[in-house]
Image: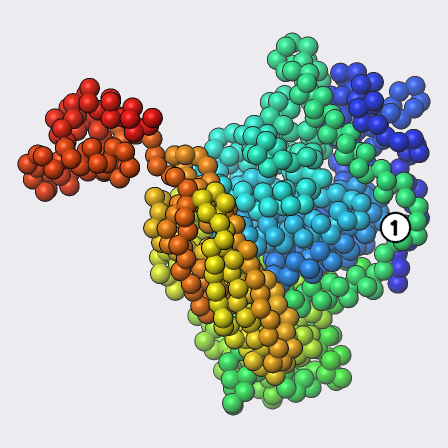
Amino acid sequence: MTLDQSAPRPATTDRPFDVERVLAELTLAEKASLLSGLDFWHTQPVERDGETLVPSVMVTDGPHGLRKQDESADHLGLGGSVPATCFPTAAALGSSWDADLLRRVGEALGRETRTHDVAVLLGPGVNIKRSPLCGRNFEYFSEDPVVAGDLAAALVDGIQSRGVGTSLKHFAANNQEADRMRVSADVDERTLREIYLPAFERVVTRSQPWTVMCAYNKVNGVYASQHDWLLTTVLRDEWGFEGLVVSDWGAVRDRVAGVAAGLDLEMPSSGGRTDAQVVAAVRAGELDEAAVDAAARRVLQLVARSLPALRSTGAEDDSFDIDAHHTLAREAAAAGTVLLKNEPVDGAPLLPLAAPADVAVIGELARTPRYQGAGSSQVNPTRLDDALTALREAAGTDLPFAPGYTLAEGPADDRPADELVAEAVATARGAGTVVVFLGLPAAYESEGYDREHLDLPADQVALLTAVAAANPRVVVVLAGGSAISVSGWRDAVPALLVGWLGGQAGGSGIVDVLNGAVTPSGKLTETIPLRLEDTPSYGNFPGELGHVRYGEGVLVGYRWYDARRMEVAYPFGHGLSYTTFAYDDVAAQVTGSGADAAVRVQVRVTNTGAVAGAEVVQVYVGDPVAQVQRPERELKAFAKVPLAPGASRVVAFDLDARDLSYWHPVLRRWVVEGGEFVVAVGASSRDLRAQVSVDVDGEDVTLPLGELSTLGEALQHPVAGPVVRAGLDGATIDPVMLAMATDMPLAVIADFGLAGLDRGALGQLIEAANG
């Protein structure tokens, strides 16, 4: 089936759109009008004397499907949305670790966006999963910025290859829904630079999204919509962003400050209120008109980039193949499914299902799939697969089914819970294998609020306990947008997999994995902890009284669990297969030094099993000794490697200086501190198959000395150290006193007359050290 777009296209002329000519013709009021929306979804046009100087273009929600609504629609639900392919959410797409797949999904999204005359699809989201409680985690890729950045860049490349734009969001430090429109994310610069900004940076520098969307929240007390350091210093000056910065819908608090800071477009419409504020500020001398020109120019550039696709009338550009896109969504759903556990029962693993016709299906989620999250990303799917129907079709028979529990969005069922469980137990008792579908109800997670806990509903856990007691051959399939606690029940389950929110073809994609039509290759992009209390942000999430303190610093996700030697249910990067893989010939060679330091890593991977499969090879780097605390290991590269049975492939990774660096909080720049680095290669953050140590010749990271530098710092200084040490060698100082003095400022040392220093000698020493 092919969808043709027969609606009239936006009114445009065929004359080339000359941005600078148009900008020069506009009045101050007209330029200011471009800086806010016409309505909820369109940019402002400029019309004069019956002529359209600047056409209006449409943007609309994503990121895993087009959500184009009429202006009369509800803006947060499905009302008025055109049918579109609902691809798996970012939680599922990320778990594929497959950049090529995400580019293909992006191309399909771009084609649908173009077909419906939309200029910009609002996505993807690359915010870090700081806490599994964040209600919008289903829209984000990972707890790690390398995974999030690389996969989002692939998606952006795919979408924009079709001549439409993306909106990278939500910039920055938007890691919770609670109080999201006011809260200040209080986070130090090193943590921002190493954890919360790199995914944005990777996408901007590699793929140049047409737009970047600022977040609602404050960052260290300043709203993101008027944060000059974020929007101009970092985004434009450092990263070279060339596109337009748009507000999240309703994120603007001070429009004049926003224009000055680099916020180009406010959405939605302010009814002219903020346009007038901009004009008044310029006329009062409070805002430089050059800032208005810069923002208006970027809006005009966005219009100019959009017009070729909007003017196109070719059949290929104005349609998309609904069936082909559904098939791609099914492939993506299967690729993002993670097999967490597959233990033998009666001598053989339960999966893949050996006898699909001898299966009982339990759980309302098998019949009423939860396939996407709630809020602005809701897509009206072109069709919807459920796992129950897909299992029955694969088995060629009417498999027995019992709902076991109810869902608000499922069929009405007034039977009491114990009766539903009893029916499920009876259904399970006579089956060869029982597949139980469990997960988070829709009300548990959504844009706009956070989860309260990590647990499954109690009625689902009670159902599973009863079914497993009746038939130990149980496979559990989990649905949800983020980590779900498996503590208390996973030991009773031989096989466990998670399909996240798998989109409109998630039901059939899961069944492809269950039946072995697809060998699972998904890997976790977030740690599944044993308890909520173990999570890094526990006690610092979601904050209080308008502030949330990022007290865990750079120890986010697996970095935290590794630093604390903490047990987890399933580690970052974990995911099983129906085949096995061996790693050997791991080698690392230093190929550069200093600011150009580089390491080339190679490993040979072999499929040692009987079926074809794909392995996600993960490269981690550790820096055991540094001036700052560094995580034990950090993911720096990965590759998905498909292999036939018995086949081998040598995979190479080139790590650059940035992969070895940390953000120095005193020098305020990225530094490569020389010394030993440990390069580990493996199948997860805790399944490291081999590691190699290399010595890197780093940069000079000597800190400047001052009167408040400590004696210990002076002793480590290459110039001051020998002088101070000589002064100490000539004095009789009790060892305990010397230990106490190590953290004393040099000014105090001089005042005490220690180390041969007085104030005059100290000044000379500091001058020589910093010379």
Position of 473 relative to 456 (above/below): below
Identify the residue under disc 1: 317
Q: Is residue 660 left or right of residue 64?
A: left
Q: Nearer the viewer, residue 558 or 60?
A: 558
The number of numbered discs placed on residues in the rendered structure image is 1
Quarter of the image containing the C terminus? top left
Please name the residue shown 67% across and 74% down the image.
Answer: 518
Q: Secondary structure at mark 1?
A: loop
Please name the residue shown 75% across and 47% down the image.
Answer: 160
Position of 656 relative to 243 (above/below): below
Q: Is residue 108 left or right of residue 744?
A: right
Asked which colour scheme the image uses, the reply is rainbow
Q: Tag 1: residue type?
A: Asp
In x, y percent, where is residue 244?
Answer: 69, 34
Residue 28 visible from this viewpoint: yes
Q: Within the image, what quadrant is residue 13 found in?
A: top right
